[in-house]
Amino acid sequence: MSALDFGRAISKSLFTLYLFTHNDILTTIIPTTLFALVSAPLYSPYRCVHVVWWIWLHLLHFNVANQVIDPAEDGRNKASRPIPAGYISLRDAVYLRWSLVPICLVSSAFYSIQVLSASLAITLLTLWYNEFKAHSHWFSKNLMTGLGYACFQAGATLIAGRDMSQLEPNALLAVLLSIAMFATTLQAQDFKDQEGDRSIGRRTLPIAHPSPARVSMFVGLPMWSICLTQVWRMDAYCSVAFVLYSGLVGLRFMVCKTTQADRLSCQLYSVSYTLICVTSA
């Protein structure tokens, strides 16, 4: 293999890894990084690189595990993903999925036992969510994802902080609030995927209970915003702006019900969730 061919192979491999995670940059990497940097607080600027790397590595692990479960469904509804797009074979993706388990655990062990514990929890939740099909019903999906996000936040916050063996009380409270908030509003990401989810028999909340699902967004987002402004004692101007934005996003889920509208609503929810993560911290 020539140097040029080797370079192309490396570039393709890196681009493939990027494709596995690029849709979750806004929904996971950015809000979780901000959460960690604000709640730790950051021990040194150098730690920021470690935080982003740890989050991305574990997100890659989860996404590869998720996408090898039903590549046929991805081919119908998410053809740009690496497997249906032909960037990686299903067999190689399965190898990658299981090789990432020790990589995540060993890399986490270099930080602390507590970070290793967060990594192990993500590994077990990933197994439960995908191989044991916790994603097939809305209740288990919301619960598992909420717990998974909490593990991401806890691990990232530990890495960012001065003492990587324990979370500060405020950071721990923020993680617990985040579990509750995300577990009760995760359906925001399911509205836009109803057609594909219905075709494989998945029982997400928008499919099982369409009207209550939209009401939950209209009520839940401003409710959590009000709760957080009180817990963290935000000033009046920030509180009003925060609650107003969340209320408008919740209202949009109620009145705009097309697939295209739900995609935009989900993006706005991601911004709202980022603000909530920063506020929670």
Image (cartoon, grey):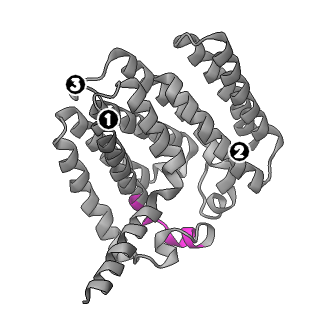
Q: CA distance from mark 1 to mark 2?
A: 34 Å
- Label 3 CA crowd tier, 10 Å (few <14, some 14–19, many 20+): some
- Percent across and percent down for residue 82 are 47, 70
Q: Given the image, on which type of amino acid does mark 1 rest?
A: Pro
Residue span colored magenta: 64-75
74 part of magenta stretch: yes
- Percent across and percent down for residue 194 are 68, 55
* Above or below 273: residue 127: below
- Label 2 CA crowd tier, 10 Å (few <14, some 14–19, many 20+): many
* Left or right, residue 59 beside residue 27: left
Say if residue 127 shows up in the picture: no
Residue indicated by mark 2: 265
* Above or below 84: residue 197: above
- Of helix, strand and loop, which one carries label 2? helix
Q: CA distance from mark 3 to mark 1?
A: 15 Å
**Foreground pick, 48 / 195:** 48
* Above or below 80: residue 116: above
Residue indicated by mark 3: 163
Q: Given the image, on which type of amino acid does mark 2 rest?
A: Ser
Mark 3 and mark 1 lie on one chain; the one further toward the N terminus is 1
**Foreground pick, 103 / 8:** 8
- Percent across and percent down for residue 220 are 66, 27
Name the residue rendered at 70%, 17% in the picture: 240
- Of helix, strand and loop, which one carries label 1? helix
The image quadrant of residue 100 is: bottom left
Residue indicated by mark 1: 45
- Label 1 CA crowd tier, 10 Å (few <14, some 14–19, many 20+): few
Q: How many marks?
A: 3
* Left or right, residue 62 beside residue 143: left
The residue at the far right in this view is 255
